[in-house]
Amino acid sequence: IKILRLEQGRKRYAEKKEDFFQVSFRSIVGQVLAGQKECVFLQFQPDLALIYLSFSFLHSTQECSIRIRQLSERLLWALSQYMALQVRIGVSDVHHSYSDIRKSYKEVQEAITYGLLKPEKSVFYYETGDAEKSREEERLQKEIKAQIAAQKYGEALVQMNSFFEIITW
């Protein structure tokens, strides 16, 4: 999470205790993440915080992606609503080992840096994730066509909902 115009945000809390802004920020992020079973929140700099999520209990990359999108939307809304903050969220590729944390951090930095060129957006995914997303879209399209051809309309509808979730981020 990259906080834009940090000093403006701090000025709104200037009459409060010195650390009130940061405590409020961490509290709101903590509330949004409260339901996450495997999560680490780190604030490296006043304007930069990292959230590492593990979804070992989920069985597909698609489910992970949907959860990340939902959390990102809730974080954007809560920080905007309660603190009037404008933030950018960078999302790395999915990694399967703690040894990839450094790689994940670099991917997030790259995604956020790229995102600064697109001020109309707030959540940015590392480029390789877009390729994986495209492969998932193709796979779902094939499954939907096959299910319709086999007249399995209920199953096709479920896959269409998954497809819709992917293409609307």
Image (tube, helix red, strand yellow):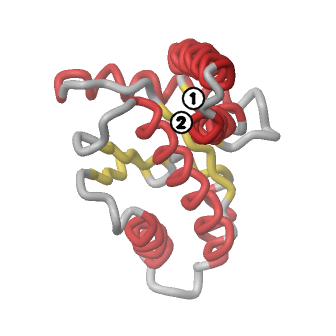
Residue positioned 43% across, 39% down in the render: 63
Q: Secondary structure at mark 2?
A: strand
Displayed quadrant of residue 166:
top right
Residue lying at 41% horizontally and 39% vertically, measured from the top left: 64
Compared across the picture, whether 82 is left or right of 52 comes to right
User: Which three-letter amino acid code belongs to the residue tagged 2?
Assistant: Gly
Image position of 72 with respect to 139: above or below: below
Q: Quadrant of residue 130?
A: top right
Residue in view at x 55 percent, y 13 percent = 135
Mark 1 falls on what kind of element?
Answer: strand
Q: Which residue is mark 1?
A: 125
Q: Amino acid at mark 1?
A: Tyr
Image label count = 2
> Mark 1 vs mark 2: which is more N-terminal?
2
Q: Position of residue 102 (x, y in %)?
A: 28, 24
Give the percent coordinates (x, y) of residue 17: 45, 84
The reply to whether callout 1 and callout 2 are in contact (CB within 8 Å) is: yes
Q: Quadrant of the C terminus?
A: top right
The dot on residue 90 is 2
- Badge 1 crowding class, 10 Å Cα cut-off, few under 14, some 14 to 19, many 20 or more, is many
Residue drawn at 51 percent across, 51 percent down: 47
55 relative position to 22: left or right: left
Choose between 8 and 52: the one closer to the eye. 52
Mark 2 residue crowding within 10 angstroms, few (<14) / some (14–19) / many (20+): many
Instruction: Please state the horizontal and vertical placement of residue 106, each as a whole percent of the image.
Output: 41, 22
Q: Is residue 18 above or below residue 168?
A: below
| Residue 81 versus residue 42 in the image, above or below | below
In this view, the residue farthest toward the front is 151
Q: Position of residue 19 (x, y in %)?
A: 41, 74
The answer to which of 130 and 26 lies nearer the viewer is: 130
Can you say whether 70 is above or below 129 in the image? below
